């Protein structure tokens, strides 16, 4: 027993438990706890950041996919519209016309700042004009068919006369224009005894165009006036005689017809500005021609109106 008591006392002497030791041990425990807490916090933050990054990547991917779908849809619609426009002769002609008068406008724009560039654009415009004339060969034959359709389908005598006369002068316009472009490209002239020159054919073509376009404007005004009078008559006649649906359908037809002829009027009036300038009427009356900028603007406007109507139909 004495020996055991001696051993216990000796151990207590070798490992005394002091306050500094306990404090140091407590500090070590707190440091371990703090390190563990910091490590767990880093893990949570890293997990949160990974989730946030994944969400951002997912959102970005969805946004990119949506943008790609929108871009593809827009490209598809533009390609479809372009295909519809270029699938007809008139559509291709008006696209070429847009380029022709666009170059004419750019020629006017660079006239002061860069005369050499201006001449280059005006030369391109003339080449596109000749190209359009080549594609209009035999177009005068279509006017014969149009006159036949007008005569068979129109009831109003005034409309028949005005419209057929308009198409007749358009026929002369295309015919003289065809003769002019053939002689220009082949560099030939009529025999001298005929007294017909290329310049004379060009003037005849432009004068025929002026008369034809003026008559068609009169026809457009007449049709527009008729739509308003017919609309008033319809509203009066609809009382107790037509259903609401029938009135609505008839009004929609009249509205569509009016809109079409309003666009026709705007398009033909824009062409009239170009036609008047080509016939030198402003120079003869005012002593000054309309500049290429105004002519190019109205030419592009006429082409765009036609292409817009073509895309809607």
Image (spheres, rainbow, N blue to C red):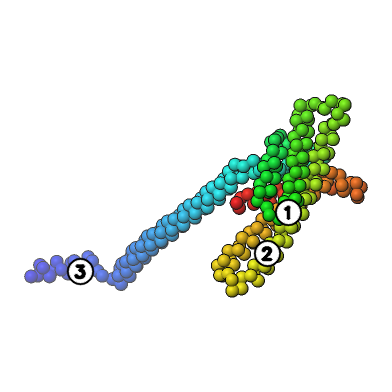
Report the Cα–Cα distance between label 3 and label 2: 123 Å
What residue is pinned by disc 2? 230
Query: Percent position (x, y) of residue 138?
Result: 70, 35
- For mark 3, does the 10 Å Cα neighbourhood hold few (<14), some (14 to 19), or many (20 or more) residues? few
Query: Total label count?
Result: 3
Query: Percent position (x, y) of residue 100?
Result: 73, 41
Closer to the chain start, of discs 1 and 2, is: 1
What residue is pinned by disc 1? 157
Closer to the chain start, of discs 3 and 1, is: 3
Residue 123, relative to residue 74: is it above or below? Answer: above
Q: Viewer-nearest of labels 3 and 1?
A: 1
Secondary structure under tag 1 reads: helix
Report the Cα–Cα distance between label 3 and label 1: 135 Å
Task: Identify the residue at horizontal 22%, vertical 65% (top origin).
Answer: 14
Query: Percent position (x, y) of residue 104?
Result: 77, 43
Q: Viewer-nearest of labels 1 and 2?
A: 1
What residue is pinned by disc 3? 12
Q: Nearer the viewer, residue 71 or 103?
A: 103
Specify whether 8 is left or right of 136.
Answer: left
Report the residue that reaches farthest toward the left: 1
Mark 3 touches mark 2? (CB < 8 Å): no
Task: Identify the residue at horizontal 79%, vertical 39% (top origin).
Answer: 205
Residue 42, relative to residue 244: is it above or below? Answer: above
Task: Identify the residue at horizontal 82%, vertical 39% (top origin).
Answer: 204
Task: Identify the residue at horizontal 36%, vertical 62% (top origin).
Answer: 40
Closer to the chain start, of discs 3 and 2, is: 3
- For mark 2, does the 10 Å Cα neighbourhood hold few (<14), some (14 to 19), or many (20 or more) residues? some
Residue 247, relative to residue 198: is it above or below? Answer: below
Query: Percent position (x, y) of residue 89?
Result: 64, 41
The quarter in which the N terminus is drawn is bottom left
């Amino acid at each position: 027993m004495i020996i055991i008591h001696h051993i216990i006392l000796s151990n207590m002497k070798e490992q005394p438990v002091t306050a500094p030791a306990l404090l140091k041990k407590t500090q070590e425990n707190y440091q371990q706890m703090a390190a563990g807490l910091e490590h767990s916090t880093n893990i949570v933050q890293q997990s949160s950041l990974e989730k946030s990054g994944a969400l951002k990547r997912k959102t970005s991917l969805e946004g990119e996919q949506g943008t790609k779908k929108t871009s593809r849809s827009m490209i598809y619609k533009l390609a479809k519209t372009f295909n519809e426009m270029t699938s007809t002769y008139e559509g291709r002609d008006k696209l070429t016309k847009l380029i022709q008068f666009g170059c004419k406008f750019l020629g006017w724009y660079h006239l002061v700042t860069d005369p050499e560039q201006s001449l280059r654009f005006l030369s391109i415009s003339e080449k596109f004009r000749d190209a359009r004339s080549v594609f209009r060969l035999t177009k005068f034959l279509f006017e014969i068919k149009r006159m036949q359709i007008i005569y068979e389908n129109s009831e109003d005598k005034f409309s028949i006369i005005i419209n057929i006369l308009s198409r007749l002068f358009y026929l002369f316009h295309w015919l003289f224009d065809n003769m002019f472009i053939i002689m220009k490209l082949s560099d030939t002239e009529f025999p001298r005894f005929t007294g017909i020159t290329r310049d004379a054919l060009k003037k005849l073509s432009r004068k025929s165009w002026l008369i034809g376009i003026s008559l068609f404007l009169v026809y457009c005004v007449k049709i527009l006036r008729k739509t308003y009078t017919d609309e008033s008559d319809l509203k009066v006649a609809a009382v107790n005689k037509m259903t609401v649906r029938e009135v609505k359908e008839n009004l929609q037809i009249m509205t569509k017809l009016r809109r079409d002829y309003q666009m026709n009027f705007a398009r033909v009036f824009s062409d009239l500005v170009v036609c008047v300038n080509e016939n030198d009427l402003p120079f003869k009356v005012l002593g000054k021609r309309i500049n290429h900028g105004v002519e190019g603007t109205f030419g592009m406007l006429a082409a765009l109106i036609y292409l817009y109507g073509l895309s809607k139909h």
